[in-house]
Structure formats: structure tokens, C-alpha cells
Amino acid sequence: MNARSLIGPLAASIIPYLAFVILSRNPGLDAVFVLPGAHFYIVSSVALLAAIVAIFVGVAGRRVRNIKVSFLALSFVSLAILFMVHGLSTPNLLLHVTPLPGISAPLSVLFATLWLWLSSWHSDHPLIRFLSRRERILLPLWTVLIAVIGTTGLLRPEIVDFIPLDVDPLNGSMTALVIFVNLITGYRYYRSYLYSRFPLELAIVYSAAWLIAAQLIMTQGVLWHGSWWLYHFLLLAAMLVVLAGLYRQYASKRSLSGAIKGLFTTDPVERITNALQPSVRALMLATESKDPYTAGHNFRVTLYALKIAEQLQLGPEQLRALVGGTIVHDVGKIETPDAVLNKPGRLTPEERAVIEEHPVRGYEMCRNLGFMEEELGIIRSHHEKWNGEGYPDRLAGERIPRMARIVAVADVYDALTSNRAYRPAMSHEEAMAILNANKGTHFEPACVEAWERACEADPEMAREGSALWERGIGRSALA
């Protein structure tokens, strides 16, 4: 990692804290502003913005099928509700002087930090997979839980007397935990950003830096002093930068309802492009720049896999997952040497071994970017065989993820019907004969039969996939 490239995130944390130190050590500069009303309105504004961000992020998380984005929503919900409690418990406003403000503020940062940390974990971690399967209920359940905790604190502030978060040793321990966890989170996201260049990942790095500075100022500042007020604005900045990063990465000219309706359109290009998040488009275009054949291949395989999935009656959410994983199923080839990837002829066994590394390479890349379980299964397992003789994990039968079984059929069919340097394209009939001959060995029989039904229902569909890409329609739609 280039040390120079860390200057921005480090400065984001260090400069505000240095400003706090300078102010707090110079009483002449560190004016006192005893403004309970202003404190309430500032904190309430931050909390309201955090709630708005949480809603926006929550909707985006469902739309783009990215567990990292869903965890961001949980982070901001925690910050919004507990920071609102901090504002409502402003001394001598609605309540008398209580320990609640000194406890609710650090708790809001702590919970926001922990959810942000979880978002940096690999998306195939057992805990993350457990939570992602419950994604639909996770946000409402956590919101209710935090709201109950906050309301109880406001109604019975005396019950928090036994939680001395505003004095040592808990104060110092919590600060150390927040700093440590945010450093890990920022480091993980920054390493991922250096590869992906996704705006949201860089935004989270800056957000983690500001959370560190805010925690230090919160615990060391003196109530109502100008230096103490700084942390409120740092929390505001942390939310704004994530909102900006989220908008830059996932914003689209299409409305959310339009994207959902796109799943049900009969137009093959819209079926694919409407389900793609911009970050997936970026990965696919990176693959195209490395290997032009792979890009057209990915588009056609996605089209064919959708047709198979429809015959198997997969639901809309599963179709979105299928598109998101299939369109980048060969993304691991980005790291394959050009001499092997573009060799004009048959590969040697050694070169074949290099090529066969691409499912794992793609899987490692995409699990760091928050791809969910179904998409990861496609990327890693689309070369597994029904009889267990495939790669990379030699899975067999129903141990192979269902969507990967679908993509295996579409992938081989397109490879057989495409021109290669060492052989011309086969006809549809020749390719189908090979698929049928390998039912029960290479392929799940039900997937081959579903592809046969799809081709019988639309005899022109297989040729249509190649024609769309050759005319540039698929390519321009994904650009």
C-alpha cells in the first residue's frame, strides 16, 4: 500500500483532533457556549439526517443486493436513534441533569462503528451469511430494539446510572475499542478501494476516520466548550460523505420502480441491464478491456441463464441474483496473464491450470466487495460438474449451488456455439447433442431440459443473443 495514498484519510482524522487539542489547551480560544436549545437542534438535525441516510441506504441495499450496504443502513439507524436520545436528554431542556447524554452519545458511535466493522467482513463469513439470509427482517428488528432502548432511557434515565460510560475505565476502554475497530474497518475498505476504485468504499474510509476523531473529542472535551462542539459536526460529516459515496456509486437515471419493472420486461437487454448495479457494470467493463471475447460471452451466458431460470420458475429476487453473478462470472480472468488468456490455440496442461484459477480469483475479489451468497456461488462454482469432477472444489450434485448449475449449462452452450481460434462455432443442434450426452455427468439434467424447453419456445433466442452483442446493443447498454 502506498503511504502517500493514505494522507487524505489520515488527515481527515488527525486535523480535527489537532484543532480540538489546540482549542482545549488555550482557554482564550476555547469559548464557552451554553446553548441547550442550539445543542438540541444541532443534534436533532444530525439524527434526522442519519435517519434519512439509513432509509436511503436501506432501500439501496435491497436494490443492489449488497450486504455491505445493508449493514451501512444498520449503522446509521443506530447513530440516528441513539443520537436523538442524546439530543432529547440535553441538560435542563426536557430533562434535568442526568447521565443519559454522556452515555447515549458514545453508545451511538459504538453501535455505528460495530455495524460498519461488520460491513468490512468477507461476505462469505458464516456470521455474515447468517445475517444476510435474514436481511429483510434485520433492519426493522434492530430499529425496534434500539428505539425501545432509547425510549426506556428517556422515560427512566436513572436506570443508566450503573453504566459509567462517561468515566474511566469504561470510558477509556470504549474509546480504545472504537479506535481499534475503525482502524481495521478503514484499512480493509482502503485496500479494497485501491483495487476497485468504488466511491462508496473511499467514503467509508473517511467516515471511519471521522468517527475516530469524534470519539476522542467526545470523551476528552469539556461540556459546552467550543472544542467540545466539534464532534457533532464530525458525525455530520461522516454521514454526508457516505451519502455522497453511495449516490456516486449506485445512483441511476432510472427510478427504483422502473428498475424493478425491468425484471418483468420481455426485452432481453433490459432484463440484464436493469438488474445491474453500477459497480457490477464496472467489473464487467474491466473484464471486457482484458478479454473482449469474455465480455460478449458474459452477456450471452446471462441471457441464456435467465431463460433457463424462467423455465425453472425462479422468482424475481433470484433472477436479480442470477444476473448479478452471471454477468461477472469470469471476472477472475482479469488476473490471468494475457499470454495465456489470448493464446491462439489449444492450451497446454500448465496453461489450463492457470485458467482454472479464475473462479477462485473472481470469488476472492467479489467477496471483498460485498457480493451476496447466491452471486458468489455462481462465480466460484460455475465450472463444477454434476458428477463431482469439476473445479475448483469438486462439488457434486445438489452440493453445487443451484444458480451455478444453471450457469454451467448456459456457459458451455455459448462456448460451443462461439467461434474460437482453434475451431469454428458449432450449430445449435450439435451443441444440444453434447449437452444431452453430458446430462447427469457434467450437467444437472433438469437444467439441460429447461434450456431445451426455452429453445423450443423461442427458436430464434439462441441466435438473438449473439446478434444483440454483435450489433453493439448489449455493449452500449452496459457501458
Image (cartoon, rainbow, N blue to C red):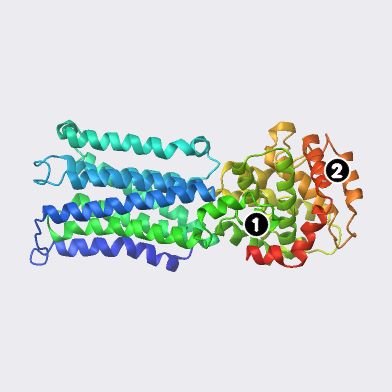
Q: CA distance from mark 1 to mark 2?
A: 28 Å
* Residue wearing tag 1: 270
State which quarter of the image contains the C terminus. Answer: bottom right
* Residue wearing tag 2: 435
Q: Is residue 473 left or right of residue 76?
A: right
Q: Between residues 208 and 160, which one lies in front from this camera angle? A: 160
Residue lying at 8% horizontally and 46% vertically, measured from the top left: 92
Residue lying at 52% horizontally and 61% vertically, measured from the top left: 252
Local crowd size for mark 1, using a 10 Å CA cut-off: few (<14), some (14–19), many (≥20): some
Give the percent coordinates (x, y) of residue 134.
Answer: 49, 35
Vertical relation: 34 (above or below) 6:
above
Vertical relation: 374 (above or below) 352:
above
Give the percent coordinates (x, y) of residue 347.
Answer: 83, 57
Give the percent coordinates (x, y) of residue 410.
Answer: 77, 48
Nearest to viewer (mark 1 / mark 2): 1
Dot 1 or dot 2, earlier in sequence? 1
Q: Is residue 380 left or right of residue 239?
A: right
Could one spot residue 120 in this view of the protein? no
Q: Is residue 197 left or right of residue 17?
A: right
Amino acid type of the residue tagged 1 in the rendering: Glu
Q: Between residues 174 and 32, which one lies in front from this camera angle? A: 32
Could one spot residue 194 in this view of the protein? yes
Vertical relation: 380 (above or below) 422:
above
Residue lying at 68% horizontally and 58% vertically, measured from the top left: 269
Residue lying at 8% horizontally and 41% vertically, measured from the top left: 96
Element type where label 2 sits in the image: helix
Amino acid type of the residue tagged 2 in the rendering: Leu
